[in-house]
Image (spheres, helix red, strand yellow):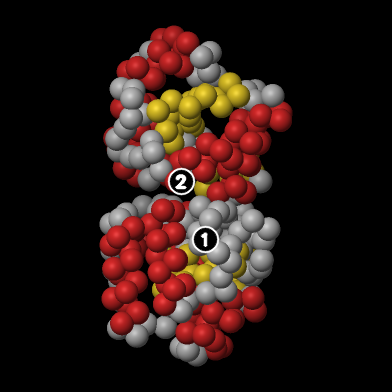
Amino acid sequence: MVRDTAADPQRAVAAVDELARLGVAALAGEYHSVVARAAAARADALGLPFLCSSAVLDALTEQPTERVARLAPAQSHGWRIYAEFLLGAGHNRIAVAAQPSVYWASGARILREHLAPRGGTVIELDMRALAPTAVCDELVAHRATALLLLVGIPEPAVSIVKSVRRDRRLADILIGAPAGQPEFAEWATLLGDDGAAIPFLRYLPERLSPLGARVGTALRERLAEAPSFIAFEGYDTVAVLAEVLRSHGADRARIAESWPRVAVEGTRGRIRFSRTPGISVRQWAWPPVQVVDRDPAEPDRFRILHAG
């Protein structure tokens, strides 16, 4: 049974309640971290096991729980790798264009905590107060060498990128999007060449396993385009749940108790869940992490810039 949360925490809670009443054995999915947190909290309260496929917010639940497991890496893990990429590329004055959100605030904090001891500075630009064109003036005034988009798509991200690309004063600035916005076909459609050379995080190995290659081929045929890393997360979620149900049945308590014993061959490596310091749920530590961008010479092709 499928329910669309529509990136709305309240709809997510309502969906969890409905599915629980309908007697489902487990929940899976969710891409948006703030929505996943609402779903995880409600599932935990109802005693319903939840396998989170894509959301990365470290504090997925307020308290440690045995009912929730996660495939995606925690935000602190991936964004530290992104911070290392920035430092390695010579960027130590980084501006972040941010909207109000627990997720964006958490990302900015992770970047600041990792960069500050290494001589890096993070300048926050509040997008509630700035128009996209005004962002350019702020970047010049603060002598930033990189701008990170901690904002939603299509807007204001698309307008910010277009404004920066057209400002001759900012010809050398790096635009980055650690949350992965450029992964989506919509990004390339809306921005064209302006959307290239904007590094982002994705969770794929340099080379897929034989299973990953077979799944990638099948997904490409089904989707009529190259699958995103989120599609591989989705396949791995199904593979884990199928193995758990085969081995432990459909009893909710037994499914939740089985997370520490999972050992499933996924498209991106062998999946096991463990207790990780600072993470409140059972965590796969870790999926492969890359920093990639769209190649300016061929925007449909991704270049691997850094791996963690």
Say what secondary structure mark 2 lies in.
helix
Name which residue type carries label 2.
Tyr
Residue 99 in which image quadrant: top left
Residue 145 or residue 235, whichever sits in front: 145
Q: Tally the numbered discs.
A: 2
Residue 115 in sight in this render: yes
Residue 21: x %, y % from top left: 31, 82
Residue 231 in which image quadrant: bottom left
Q: Are marks 1 and 2 in contact (CB under 8 Å)?
A: no
Say what secondary structure mark 1 lies in.
loop
Residue 273 in which image quadrant: bottom right
Question: Where 174 sits versus 62, above or below?
Answer: above
Question: Where 80 sits versus 41, above or below?
Answer: above
Residue 269: x %, y % from top left: 62, 64
Badge 2 crowding class, 10 Å Cα cut-off, few under 14, some 14 to 19, many 20 or more, is many
Q: Residue at x 65, y 79 (%)?
A: 261
Residue 278 or residue 273, whichever sits in front: 278
Residue 165 in sight in this render: no
Name which residue type carries label 1.
Glu
In the rendered structure, which disc, 1 or 2, sits on the residue that comes first in sequence? 1
Badge 1 crowding class, 10 Å Cα cut-off, few under 14, some 14 to 19, many 20 or more, is few
Q: Which residue is mark 2?
A: 103
Q: What label sits on residue 62 in the rendered view?
A: 1
Q: What label sits on residue 139 in the rendered view?
A: none
Q: Residue at x 44, y 54 (%)?
A: 33
Q: CA distance from mark 1 to mark 2?
A: 14 Å
Q: Residue at x 47, y 76 (%)?
A: 49
Q: Is residue 279 left or right of residue 162?
A: right
Question: Where 160 sits versus 302, above or below?
Answer: above
The N terminus is located in which quarter? bottom left
